[in-house]
Image (cartoon, rainbow, N blue to C red):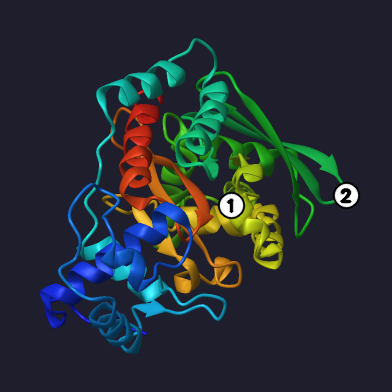
Amino acid sequence: MASPPLTDLTDRAREIFRLVVEGYLDSGQPVGSKTLAGPRADGGGRLNLSPASIRSVLAELEVLGLLAAPHTSAGRMPTETGLRLFVDGMMQVAEPTASEREAIEKRLGAPGPIEAALETTSALLSDLSGAAGMVMVPTREPRLAQLSLVSLGQNRALAVLVGEDGGIENRVVDLAVAATASQLEQASNYITARLAGRTLAEASAAMRRELASGQSQLDSASRALVERGLAVWSEDAARRPVLIVRGASNLLDEAALQDIERVRQLLDDLESKQSVAELLDSAREAEATRIFIGSENRLFALSGSSVIASPYRDREGRVVGVLGVIGPTRLNYARVVPMVDFTARSLGKLIG
């Protein structure tokens, strides 16, 4: 259900809606008219309305689909539609304090390999949000130096890829027909000449263009070897991304245990790391932190969970991964969103 624009709400309705959402996000409990008519939690005065008038406004907001009334309570809580309206149009973001920023940078800046920093980042996000922290490990694209095809007999060859950093990776290539040593050498020389100094993606694109244009001097057998070799490496580039999840136990708070089926569904979702990684990957091209609320994403529709995700970049500004948190829809968005954003920028400074 699409949320109505804020301009459709009266000032009175907007204020009551804001207080209900903020009260729910703070306590995790529905907010009733008596609470709204009483002293404000932020130290402000009372709403200049009677409980009856407040109940009337609450009913109007419920008709609009912004609030819902649980069966066990006379209070109201925001729907996913209401949360989206609040997050997009009313939320006042609380930027991290100087001490919080210093603590984040200190923890991420501890000596050690980048893998340790990624582990720390996931745990840090969990600590900051009180939910589960997630980091998708960056895919590395080394510059390539050489590729060799070595016959293994029986229509198979070993493809040996050497990176400029000295790293070596091997793949077994199944060939449609037997290839001679000369054909394997010709294909190896052709690929090496065009991949040197490039990433695999860059080299593959260049070779595919040349093969498609008919400019290549390769015979048909060597051309098939090149294309098969490219296919094997391209398939490898699509391997499952590595996802680090920390703090799943934070999801088992007292409020969550009252709805144990939702928690079980959420933990099952987290076990499906490939699906979670795909969700995070959808935030790679975002210019800012993205927020997925409940059923806005198919993966977490049943568990009613929210995800806050932000891409992180290397020193050259290229997106290399995504990090974020997952938790109940009553996450403290105003605090967690800027924390996730700042953590993403801090981690990016460590990525070469």
Q: CA distance from mark 1 to mark 2?
A: 27 Å
Q: Residue furthest top?
A: 111
Tell me where residue 153 appears, x and y as whole percent.
86, 43
Circle 2: element type:
loop
Q: Is residue 167 left or right of residue 7?
A: right
Task: Please tell me how crowded label 2 is: few (under 14), some (14-19), or many (20+) other residues with Cα within 10 Å.
Answer: few
Task: Please tell me how crowded label 1 is: few (under 14), some (14-19), or many (20+) other residues with Cα within 10 Å.
Answer: few
Tell me where residue 308 appears, x and y as whole percent.
42, 52
Tell me where residue 249 appears, x and y as whole percent.
66, 43
Q: Which residue is mark 2?
A: 154
At x 23%, y 76%, the residue is 50
- Label 1 amino acid? Ala
Circle 1: element type:
loop
Viewer-nearest residue: 306 or 32: 32
Reading the chain from its start, which is encountered first: label 1 or label 2? 2
- Label 2 amino acid? Gln
Viewer-nearest residue: 41 or 161: 41
At x 36%, y 59%, the residue is 23
Q: Quadrant of the C terminus?
A: top left
* Dot in front, 1 or 2: 1
In this rendering, the answer to whether 75 lies above or below 253 is below
Image quadrant of residue 75? bottom left
Q: Which residue is mark 1?
A: 238
Tell me where residue 57 appears, x and y as whole percent.
25, 82
